[in-house]
Image (tube, rainbow, N blue to C red):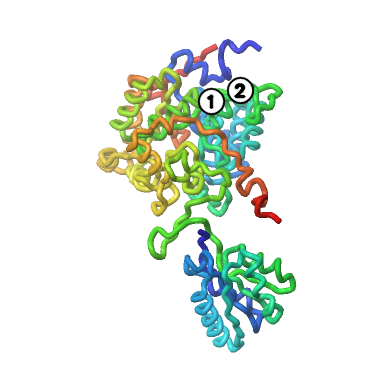
Amino acid sequence: MIIADRKPLEEILEMIKDCDNIMLVGCKGCVTVCNVGGLKEVEILASTLRIARKKEGRPLQVEEHCLERQCDPEYVEQLRDNYGKYDAVLSMACGVGPQFLSEAYPEQRFFPTVNTRFMGGAVQHGIWEERCAGCGTCVIHLYDGLCPIARCSKSLQHGPCGGSTAGKCEISKEVECIWDTIVKKKMAQGRLEDLRVHRAFKDWRTARDGGPRKSIREELVQ
Amino acid sequence: MSDNGYKSGSNLEKVLKAGHFAFTGECGPPKGANVEHLKEKMEHLRGMVDAINVTDNQTAVVRMSSKAASALMVQAGLEPNFQMVCRDRNRIAIQSDILGACALGIRNMLCLSGDHQQFGNHPQSKNVFDIDSIQLVALAKKMRDEGKFQNDEEIDVPPRLFIGAASNPFADPVEFRVYRLANKIDAGAEFIQTQCIYNMDRFRQFMKQAVDMGLTEKAYILAGVTPMKSAGMASYMSKFVPGMDVPDTLIKRLKGVDKKLQAEEGIKFALEQIEEFKEMEGVAGVHLMAIEWEHKVPEIAERAKVLPRPKVE
C-alpha cells in the first residue's frame, strides 16, 4: 500500500493562515491503514487545528469528512453537495487525493496534509518500510523475492557494492543492505550461479523516467 | 590503425602487459577551478607512477570534473586513469563522457558505482544509477570492441580505453566478494584496483581465491595501499568508513609510537605491504592512494624500490 506521513502542524497552519472555514477530507484507503488520514486522524487534526487557531484568537471552522477512497471519481463525486462552501479543503489522502479532488472541483482550493512517501508495508506496529519502486517491470523473481531496484540505495542490479558492512547499507546503519540478504539467501540455497549472470540494462521507460504513466485495461474501457 | 595489439595504448596497459609490477597513484581534483593547485599536486607524481587515478567527485563532494582534471594531466604529459561513477550520469551522459574523454587523449578508465550522495556535501541531490559499475564496464567494452553504442548504433571512431574496475575484498558478505570481482572481469574489466588494504590475512585469502578461480589470468589486480598518517586516522577509518577493515593490531602499532612518529610508522607499514605484494601470487601491482599526501609519493616510491618506472615502447 501507499505509506504517508502527516505534515508538520506548522506547515498545515501556514497553508490555511488566511482561511476561516475549511473542510478536512480523510480517505478510508491506504492512509487509514497507515494511521495518517482516516476518520480518526481527521478528527484529531480537526481538533488540533481548532485549538491552535483559537489560541491565536482567530477561530477556525472545520468540517470533517471521510471518503471511501479519494482515488476513485465515484467517491470523489460524493463531495458535490459540500464543495464551494469552504476557503480551502484539506485532503488527508496520499498525493492522488488532492489531485482527484482538484480535478473534480476546479473552483475549490485543495491542500495536502500528508507527505506521500512510498509503497510498502508495516514491518511491525508503527513501522513501515519501502518494498516497491513502481519501476513498471518487475524483476523480483530474479532476486529470490527481494527487490534491489527499490531496496538498494543505488538500485544496483549487480550488488552488493563495496559499502556493504555487516548487513547494513553504506548510507546508514538503520538501512538493511538488501544485496547482503539476496546473496546470503542465494548461497544458502546453493544457487550462487544466479548471481554470476549479467543482467541487461534496465529499461526505465516503464518507470517514472518514461514520463507520467497510464494503465489502460482495454476490456474494462467502455 | 596499428595498435600493436594494445586495446588503448596507454602506458598502464603497456607496463602491465610487459609484465612489470605496476605502480599507480591518485590525485583528487580541487574543490574549485584552481588549476595551479591541481598541477602542483600532480607534479609530485611525475615519473613516480604509471598512471594517476583522477577521482570523480569522491565521497560525493563536488570537485572539478574528473574528465577535465584528467585532460589537464594529458596536456601536462602525465597519464590519467579517469574515474567515472554511475551516481551522476545516465547512459547518455556516460557514453558521451567516454567519447569526450577519449577525444581529450584519456586512455584509462576506472568504472565505479560511486559513493551515495548521502555522504557528500549535496545530500539533497537526486541520484541517477541508471546502470551499475558492472554494466558500465560492459558498456565501455562494447563501445571499444564492437564500435557500438548501447543501443547498437555504430560509433564513428570508437573509443580506445584500458578498462578498469574496483574491488573491495573487505566489504560484506565477504564470501561473495571474489564472485563480484569475477563478474567485473567477465564484463570486461582488464585491470582491477582494490580498496585500501590493511587486513593482510583477509587479503591473502582473497587473492588465493582469485588465483584459484583463474581471475588473475584474465585481469591485472593492483593492490590498494593508503599509508596511515596517524593512529587517529586509522581509528576513524575503522569506525566510520563503510567497507573498510582496519585491524586493531595496526591501530595499536600506530598508537605504540610517539605522535610525531606515527606518520613514519604508517609509511613503514605501507612499505612492508608493498614488499609482500611484489611477491604475492596474482598481484600485478600496487595502487597507492596517498590521500592529500601527494608530496609523499616520491619518498614512498623511492623507499618501496619501485623506481625508476619502466618505459615500454
Give the chain letter at badge 1.
B
Which mark, residue B144? 2
Which mark, residue B259? none
Q: Which residue is mark 1?
A: B163
* Residue mark closest to the camera, 1 vs 2: 2
Residue B250 image point, x, y percent: 28, 38
Image marks 1 and 2: residues in contact by CB distance under 8 Å: yes
Residue A163 image point, x, y percent: 42, 42
Q: For the image shown, how many numbered marks are present on the structure?
A: 2
Q: Residue at x 61, y 22 (%)?
A: B144
Q: Residue at x 30, y 28 (%)?
A: B205
Q: Residue at x 66, y 81 (%)?
A: A19
Is B283 located above or below residue A171 in the figure?
above
Question: How dense is the environment of label 1, judged by Cα within 10 Å: few (below 14), some, or many (20 and up)?
Answer: many
Q: Is residue B197 visible?
A: no
> Which element carries disc 2, helix, strand or loop?
helix
